[in-house]
Image (cartoon, helix red, strand yellow):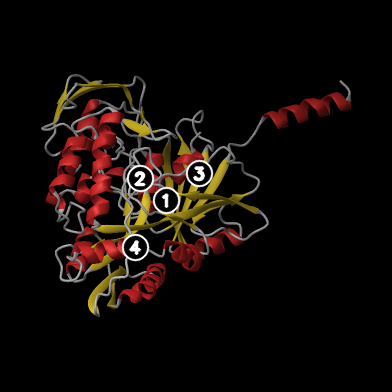
Amino acid sequence: MSLKALYLIIATFISSYVAPPQYTQGVVGFPKTFYSINAQTDAEKSIAKILFRGLVKYDNLGQIQPDLAEEIISSKDSKDYRIRLKNNIYFSNGQPITTDDVIFTLKLRPEFSDIVMQKINSKIIEFRLPNELSSFPDLLTVGIVSSKDKFNDVFHPVSSGLYQVVSVKKINNIALSAKLKSTNTENTKFNNLEIRFYENYDKVKQAASIGEIDGFLSDTAYDSKIFSAKKFTVNGRYVGLYFNTKGTAASDLELRKTLAADVPRQNIIDKVFAGNAGSYDRFYKGTKWYFEEATKLEKNDKDFNGLKFKLAYPSNETYKKVVDELVHYWSKYNIKFEVNEVKINEVSDMFDAIKENDALLVGTEISRDPDQFAFWHSTQNKPPGLNLSNYTSVRADTALEEGRKVSKFEERKIHYNVLQETLIQDSPAIPLYKPVYFYNYLKKFSFSNKSKLYSPTDQLYTFLIN
């Protein structure tokens, strides 16, 4: 054999062996858990989505698709569901995923407290709902945990998703590193992942500058010659001003409609975000449920004679700038604003803040399903509900209730159109803008086929799962 032939054989052998692809992602925020059932923060939700799979998932078009479930059959009145699991689905410890695990997981969720679950066998489960609930499939997206998991370590769960945790360690008290490996290399872009959690964006960007991470999501594009940036306006989040409709000043419908008709959204987008935010002037805008023909409020020149108005915002420099823009712009209506900074760590803090003020600026996360019962129904005016405005409307309540009783798109849209019109006429809140995010990543990687993010917590799953 000639030396050249031997060289070709060796070269062919070497080129045929490709080391498993690896990727290191930077994430803002230190998680307290990796379990899907306990995930609260963006950091926790992000990693939980790649460690756990639900019975169903949303596709890129926002449609519900089976995930762990093979088949979902619902009754005509949407009260009964029968679900059959796929064959050959396993947890990271090799144990099969069964209906015992499904029941165990869902019983830990408060939204299933009134739902009867019956195991038919290890693959089939039936659900009986007390009332019609067309949005029920959305609840089935929660990641399934193992009923045999000892839950001894919040960072080493028995996972049901396409990745499992290999190791977790702290790095010089600066970052928390979680190394993961794929459990299904055919459906994951990278065989090995490292997720590094940092305290804030500054530390993430510093890590990128010294080559510690390959990519990260942020609210600004990373200025680097070796990084690319993909821009996303997310539909799953918006920032709005919620009025205390039972308070002193904001109980005045004319005041609410006057402010709602004249909002300096473009000023906010240009001055606070340098153009990197999306205008959001109507609820449901940007979705297939949007009611294009809804009434548009007319501007007026009402003088409110020095009315005192308390406007609160969470401790956040960006929110402070947004509030300053609103106060400056609305001063022409002769309103005396008192601006209050509040600390918000959980839902109950938001309710406390708005009770002490006339309005609260806050970010809101919404589901892909149009059912916004928790935000606007009169029964949801205290935790775990999310009706911050303490809004009451028979018309809105009826629309929300009826929207839950029908499953066809055309029928549901009729009710949610009524809801949108009612929210405009009553103005319990003002939607302002949707945040923009940038996925910054090294140019040697390709994510050219990724074009949408519903929520920033979807980024890991969207980019790293094929």
Task: Please give the residue where the numbered disc 3 appears in the rendered image.
Answer: 193
Which residue type does callout 1 highlight? Val
The image shows residue 151 at horizontal and vertical percentages of 26, 44
Tell which tag, 3 or 1, sits nearer the viewer: 3
As drawn, the label of residue 168 is 1
Identify which residue is drawn at 27% across, 27% down.
Answer: 408
Identify which residue is drawn at 20% across, 48% down.
Answer: 374
Determine whether the residue tagged by mark 2 lies in a helix, strand or loop: loop
Residue 261 versus residue 332 in the image, above or below: above
Specify few, some or many for label 1: CA neighbours under 10 Å numbering under 14, 14-19, or 20 or more: some
User: Residue 321 versus residue 160: which sits nearer the camera?
Assistant: 321
The quadrant holding residue 60 is top left
Identify which residue is drawn at 65% across, 45% down.
Answer: 444
* Residue 283 shows up from this direction: yes
Alpha carbon separation for disc pair 2 and 4: 56 Å
As drawn, the label of residue 220 is none
Alpha carbon separation for disc pair 4 and 3: 53 Å
In the rendered image, which quarter contains the N terminus? top right
Tell which tag, 4 or 3, sits nearer the viewer: 4
Alpha carbon separation for disc pair 1 and 4: 56 Å
Tell me whether circle 2 and circle 1 mark residues in contact (CB < 8 Å). yes
Tally of numbered tags: 4
Specify few, some or many for label 3: CA neighbours under 10 Å numbering under 14, 14-19, or 20 or more: many
